[in-house]
Image (cartoon, rainbow, N blue to C red):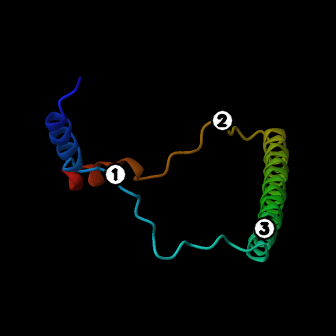
């Protein structure tokens, strides 16, 4: 058997226990709206246009590089032809002729730097 006084005390004790509820998360007053499909499509169109411009720029750069390489090959052929003409005339082109006073200028510049 239970004592009625003890039951009353237990009931009174239960009513004084504070109930702690979990804290609700703070909800912002304004939730940002998702971008509309029109805005997304406009952004995709801009990206596509930028990709096209970039592809054209890359193609132009590659064409310019190829033209420069061909020009370099043409210049090498001209140099080889000029060397052959000079060799036919008996001119030795192995070492360039030294310039008069070049060593003196070099020594002067070295002394000036010290």
State the residue at coordinates (22%, 51%): 111
- Please name whichever residue, 36 or 17, is drawn nearer the observer in this view of the structure: 17
What residue would you read off at disc 3?
44
Compared across the picture, whether 110 is left or right of 74 comes to: left
Which numbered disc, 2 or 3, marks the residue closer to the eye? 3
Q: How far apart are marks 1 and 2 (CA)?
A: 96 Å
User: N-terminal of the two: label 1 or label 2?
Assistant: 1
Find residue 24 and report its image quarter: bottom left
Q: Are marks 1 and 2 in contact (CB under 8 Å)?
A: no
Q: In this view, does 63 lie above or below 41?
A: above
Q: In this view, does 93 lie above or below 68?
A: above
Dot 3 falls on a residue whose secondary structure is helix
What residue would you read off at disc 2?
94
What residue would you read off at disc 1?
21
- Please name whichever residue, 36 or 87, is drawn nearer the observer in this view of the structure: 36
Q: Distance between the residues labelled 2 and 3?
A: 61 Å
Badge 2, how many Cα within 10 Å: few under 14, some, many 20+? few
Badge 1, how many Cα within 10 Å: few under 14, some, many 20+? few
Compared across the picture, whether 35 is left or right of 48 comes to: left
> Whole-percent x and y of residue 21?
34, 51
Which numbered disc, 1 or 3, marks the residue closer to the eye? 1
Compared across the picture, whether 49 is left or right of 96 comes to: right
> Whole-percent x and y of residue 93?
68, 40
Q: Quadrant of the N terminus?
A: top left
State the residue at coordinates (18%, 46%): 12
């Amino acid at each position: 058997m239970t004592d009625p006084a003890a039951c009353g005390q237990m009931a009174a004790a239960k009513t004084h226990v504070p109930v702690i509820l979990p804290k609700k998360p703070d909800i912002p007053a304004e939730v940002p709206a998702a971008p509309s499909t029109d805005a997304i499509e406009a952004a995709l169109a801009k990206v596509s246009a930028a990709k096209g411009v970039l592809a054209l720029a890359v193609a132009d750069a590659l064409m310019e590089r190829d033209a420069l390489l061909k020009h370099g090959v043409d210049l090498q052929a001209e140099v080889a032809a000029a060397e052959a003409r000079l060799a036919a005339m008996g001119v030795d082109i192995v070492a360039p002729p030294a310039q008069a006073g070049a060593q003196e200028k070099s020594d002067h510049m070295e002394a000036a730097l010290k």
